[in-house]
């Protein structure tokens, strides 16, 4: 049976990941914030082969659900809808864009807050630190971009890693969910399309520096 990927968010990241997932042989359903008819053309042009649908339908029976939405949209996703699902959290708190949001400025980073909002979901931080243009340009090419994976759920992290590898990237386990702060804005890895060793070193050095500062 073809595995289904549900994507919440029909912006640049959502449509690029949808396109890559379709090319990798997944069934892809993608939802925007409202009626599917408003994103149907976007999906048809930007992610041909994916199906524009509702959030509930995108989530139902999904092998993986991807949060590819702006941070302000997280609270609009019903917590119960994600219960039991492996969820890739691609959100970031970026003060330059979102403004100061004390809730998201905890030591554990954005995804630890998202995990508290969806306590029955299996949250994995991934697809959050490399620009969508780089993902599209270098999937399956010789550069083999490394994508960080952080989670407190080892099985869920392995499932996400297999998905990323199938898309054409090197999946790099960087540790528990809180380690994902090393992939966020302000880190050395954010916005950088790095190889495996460079990414591991970048995240390790960033998180070690934070630890030494008591952050």
Image: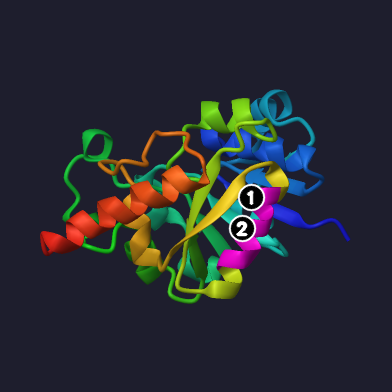
Query: Is residue 11 visible in this depiction of the protein?
Result: no
Residue 10 vs 179, above or below: the answer is: above
User: Residue at coordinates 49% horizontally, 76% vertically from top-left?
Assistant: 120
Q: Please tell me whether residue 57 belongs to the stretch shown in magenta.
A: no
Query: Magenta region: which residues?
Result: 157-165
Q: Which residue is mark 2?
A: 161
- Circle 1 sits in a helix, a strand or a loop, which is it? helix
Q: Position of residue 174 (x, y in %)?
A: 44, 60
User: Residue at coordinates 63% horizontally, 43% vertically from top-left?
Assistant: 169
Query: Is residue 7 visible in this depiction of the protein?
Result: yes
Kindly check if marks 2 and 1 are in contact, taking CB atoms under 8 A apart as contact.
yes
Residue 164 is labelled as 1
* Residue 7 in the figure: left or right of residue 70: right
In the displayed orientation, state which residue is furthest to the right. Answer: 1
As rendered, which of 188 and 33 lies closer to the eye? Answer: 188
As rendered, which of 56 and 43 lies closer to the eye? Answer: 43
Q: Quadrant of the C terminus?
A: bottom left
Q: To which quarter of the image does residue 59 belong?
A: bottom right
Q: Please tell me whether residue 162 belongs to the stretch shown in magenta.
A: yes
Q: To which quarter of the image does residue 156 belong?
A: bottom right
Q: To which quarter of the image does residue 138 belong?
A: top right
Label 1 crowding class (10 Å Cα cut-off): few <14, some 14-19, many 20+? many
- Circle 2 sits in a helix, a strand or a loop, which is it? helix
The alpha-carbon separation of the residues under discs 2 and 1 comes to: 5 Å
């Amino acid at each position: 049976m073809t595995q289904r990927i549900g994507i919440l968010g029909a912006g640049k990241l959502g449509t690029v990941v949808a396109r890559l997932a379709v090319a990798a042989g997944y069934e892809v359903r993608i939802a925007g914030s409202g009626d599917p008819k408003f994103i149907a053309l976007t999906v048809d042009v930007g992610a041909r082969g994916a199906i524009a649908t509702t959030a509930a339908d995108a989530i139902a029976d999904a092998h993986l659900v991807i949060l590819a939405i702006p941070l302000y949209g997280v609270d609009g996703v019903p917590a119960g809808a994600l219960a039991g699902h492996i969820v890739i959290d691609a959100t970031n708190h970026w003060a330059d864009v979102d403004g100061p949001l004390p809730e998201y400025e905890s030591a554990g980073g954005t995804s630890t807050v998202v995990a508290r909002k969806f306590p029955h979901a299996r949250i994995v931080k991934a697809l959050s630190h490399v620009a969508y243009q780089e993902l599209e340009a270098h999937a399956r090419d010789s550069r083999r971009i490394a994508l960080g994976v952080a989670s407190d759920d080892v099985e869920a992290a392995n499932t996400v890693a297999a998905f990323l590898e199938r898309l054409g990237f090197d999946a790099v386990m960087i540790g528990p969910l809180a380690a994902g702060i090393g992939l966020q804005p302000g880190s050395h890895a954010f916005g950088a399309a790095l190889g495996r060793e460079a990414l591991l070193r970048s995240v390790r050095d960033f998180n070690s520096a934070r630890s030494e500062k008591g952050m």
